[in-house]
Amino acid sequence: MTAAQPLATPTRWSNLGADSDAVWGSFQGSGAEPYDTMVDYGHLGFLCTCPSRKTPCKHALALLLLWVRGQIADTVTPSHVEAWMQRRTAARSRLATTAPESEADGQSGGDSATVDGAAIGDEQPDPPAPLPEPDRNSARDDRVARMHAGLAELDRWLDDRIRTGLADPSLARYATWDQLAARLVDAQAGSLANRIRRLAGLVGASPDWHDDVLAELGILHLLAQAGRRIGSLPSSLADAVATTVGWQVRQADVLAGVPDTDEWLIAGRSDVREDRIEVRRHWLRGANSGRWALALSFAAYQQSLDTSLPVGSSLRADLHRYPGPALRALVGTRYDDPVEGQNVASLFTASACSIADGCAEVGAMVATEPWLDRVPVTVRARLARAGQAWALADATGSLPILDLGTRAFDAGVAMLLAVSEGKPVDLTVEWTPHGVVPLSIHLPDRTVDIGPRANTSFVSAA
């Protein structure tokens, strides 16, 4: 369903239609030919020309999502859909005629008893043979091959962009980036696809956007090259590259690993909307280890995100980290409910550092994984103004605040200014290559959550 949600958009489909038994349409993927998809929703049948091994595939689920939302009108049934439905009806009829005789037929011989509609002594049909186990190695090899092909195509695309230059007018069109992202999704490199779509928003966003785009293109080139050489990389680095490219790791495998048990300070929360999916990041820091961890939650439109990790509280729990040095982790066993109060607030104050030390902390993490685009840090600083831009400053330096251009940004800066009164405060921020995003203000007795929200109606309601 996660893969199907981004595809459930009418503009990505053609020849959509439905009748009293089925729904159908053609989806334009990365290939030259569209994928023809049909769903028999009355008798749970699916047919799609895509190469996916899953049944139902994401295209069938996306088609059903469009249908239940009322975005597909009833039309005349095309001949190929009608022929497919007739074959399914004929197959059900054959199954019905070859089934055991009814109870009435079993009684035609006189006193013979019946069990489940079949006379005792009648020959029972052999049970159906079990389906063969899927060849997991073959499926994995196929996925690796598709990912390598997608990374090779990405590298060729990057070469073309550098050859034509950043002044190419096509870069200003979102479709240029979205088409590449769609091909990367089909190549099982979803994380890179998200980076591509975020990169599209940098074009023309500032006077120095050429520098920002060029730097991000360099990161994409690094990942494309590293992703095709995973087999020769050290194991920890290979895991980091694979997860960054988009290799999915099963949650069961992550939870089977050795837990990282600590008193976790829930330092900040940040929401963002990516391709019609809302993503919430909770930044956690070990009170004893000082290590950061990232807990992610996802929600489709109008669904709820995780609210079990209140910002400013502490939680004693097991965290299971994803492979490699990545920050992402899953919350495992919780040994108590989240706790708030002055004792917890003092732990946040103790973890705050100067801006110079904070930059060193961020630099150490980015040196390990140069493609990191969001890193948390807790600093003690005051709000400052530099022309039309806001910044965080202390005696050791300053950090520009990233202008998100939203009501959430305006509300966050206004709250920070009101709470701090222009004085230094302890706050957790999210570092990005273009500036920091304030997430929470740690006061002596409580924490104020000012992190951005994907649904800005929450901000206006507050």
Image (tube, grey):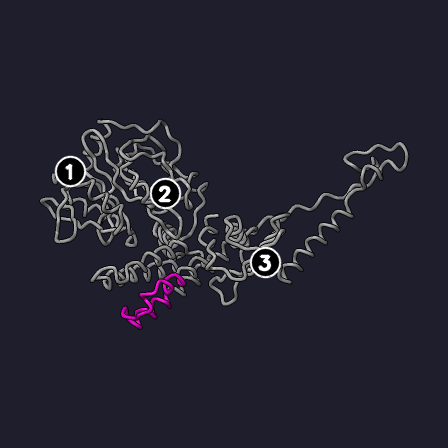
Alpha carbons under labels 1 and 3: distance apart = 61 Å
Between marks 2 and 1 in the image, the one whose residue lies nearer the viewer: 1
Which class describes the residues within 10 Å of circle 3: few (<14), some (14-19), or many (20+)?
A: few
- Give the magenta-colored segment's residue range: 155-180
Q: Position of residue 166 (x, y in %)?
A: 28, 68
Depth check: 460 or 161 in front?
460
Provide the secondary structure element on which disc 3 rests. loop
Q: Mark 3: which amino acid?
A: Thr
Q: Which residue is mark 2?
A: 296
From the viewer's perspective, is 114 left or right of 366? right
Q: Mark 2: which amino acid?
A: Leu
Q: Position of residue 35 (x, y in %)?
A: 53, 61
Q: Which residue is mark 3?
A: 75
Residue drawn at point x = 24 percent, y = 64 percent: 210
Q: Mark 1: which amino acid?
A: Ser
Alpha carbons under labels 2 and 3: distance apart = 42 Å
Depth check: 31 or 334 in front?
31
Residue drawn at point x = 42 percent, y = 42 percent: 303
Q: Main secondary structure of the magenta part?
A: helix
User: What mark, if any, has residue 60 been given in the picture?
Assistant: none
